[in-house]
Image (spheres, rainbow, N blue to C red):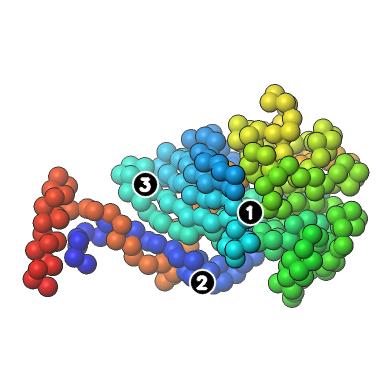
Amino acid sequence: MLASTNTLNIVPFISVENMMNLVLDIGVETFLKELAAYIEEDFARWEHFDKTPRVAAHSPDGVIELMPTSDGALYGFKYVNGHPKNTRSGRQTVTAFGVLSDVDTGYPLLLSEMTILTALRTAATSAVAAKHLVPSRHKTMTIIGNGAQSEFQALAFKAILGVDRLRLYDIDPAATARCARNLEGRGFEIVACHSGHESVEGADIITTVTADKQNATILTDNMVGSGVHINAVGGDCPGKTELHRDILLRSRIFVEYPEQTRIEGEIQQLPGDYPVEQLWQVIAGRAKGRADDREVTLFDSVGFATEDFSALRYVRDKLVGRNVHQPLDLLADPDEPRDLYGMLLRHGQKRTTA
C-alpha cells in the first residue's frame, strides 16, 4: 500500500456480497434474533444516547436522510434514501450505507452497506416492539404490502414471536406470489388474499408496509377489531401515511422518538400534543405495554438512528473470526500527523521509482 503503512488507516468495509455471506453464514432467523437482542439492549439504555430527528432532504420524488447518534463511546450514522418511483426503472426504493466510529479518536471503525441491513433491523425492531405489546397466543399476521421488506418482517415475527400463519395482500398479485414463493419451506401457513379486507380476517397482527409516498388509507377503521396489534411500517416521511385517522384515535400508540415520529409517522395526522407512549420506556420497565387482550396497540414505526447503531454494533461484533469484510484504505494517516503534505510528496516519490 503506497499511501501509508500505518494500519490505523485501514477500515473494515462490508460490501453487499459480504453482508449476504454474513447473514447466510449466521442464518437469517438467528441473525434477526441476535440483532433484536442488540436493539432491545440499546432501547433499554435509551437515555445514554444523543438523539435528534434525522436530517432530511426532500424532493418531489423521494427523500435522502442522514441518521446520526452516539452513546458517548461509539458514534454511528446512516445515509438512506426513499424513492418509491425507483422500482419503475429497476432500482431499489431504499438504499443505504452506514459508519460506526470511535468517539475518543473520531476514527471510523466500520463502513458497511445498509440496504440489506436496514431491512433486517427494521424487521427486528418491529418484532421487538411486538414482543412487548402482543399477547403470546397471537400467531397470525397479515402483511399488506408485499415488497422488499415483507419477507424480513415475516421471518422476524416467526423467529421472535413464533408467528407461523401469514395472510398476504398487495395491489400487485405478482408481489404476493413472489413473497409466498420466497417463504416456502420456512414453516409458514400462507394465504394469498385478494383484498385488504380479506387479508385482515382472523389476523392478530396487521403489518402495513407499502412504498408509495402519499397519504393513503391502507387500513380503514372497520378493518381493525379489538385486541389487534398494528405494526405500521410504511408511513415514514412527511405526507406518507397508511392508516385512517380514526384507527389512531382508538389505539394506544407507541413510538420510537416522538419528535421524529410526529413529523414522519402516522401521528402526523394528529395534533402535535396528542399523547403517545415511548417504546423504550416499556422495554426498560418504566411503563406498561398492553393493558388487556381487547386493547388495540399500534407501533408507529419510522425507524430511528439507535436501531442502525445497534445493527452496526452487532455486525462489527460478528466480524470476529470471519472473513466477510475488505480492508479499506480510507484515512490519510501519515507517520507524522502534522506532515500531511509530506505524505503526498513521499507518495509521489514512490510512484516515480516504482
Taking 244 as reference, is 4 left or right? left
**Mark 3 vs 1, N-terminal side:** 1
Mark 2 belongs to which amino acid?
Asn
* Spatial separation of the CA atoms under disc 2 and disc 3: 26 Å
Where residue 235 appears, as percent x and y from the top left, is 69, 45
User: Which quadrant is the C terminus positioned in?
Assistant: bottom left
Nearest to viewer (mark 1 / mark 2): 1
Q: Is mark 3 on a helix, strand or loop?
A: strand
Q: Dot 2 lies on which element?
A: helix
Name the amino acid, label 1: Pro
191 shown above or below 195: below
Q: In the rendering, which numbered label is found on residue 102?
A: 3
The residue pinned by badge 2 equals: 21
The answer to the question of whether label 3 and label 1 lie on touching residues, with beta carbons closer than 8 A, is: no
Q: Distance between the residues labelled 1 and 2?
A: 27 Å
Q: Name the residue tied to disc 1.
A: 84
Decide: marks 1, 2 in contact (CB < 8 A)?
A: no
Label 1 SS: helix
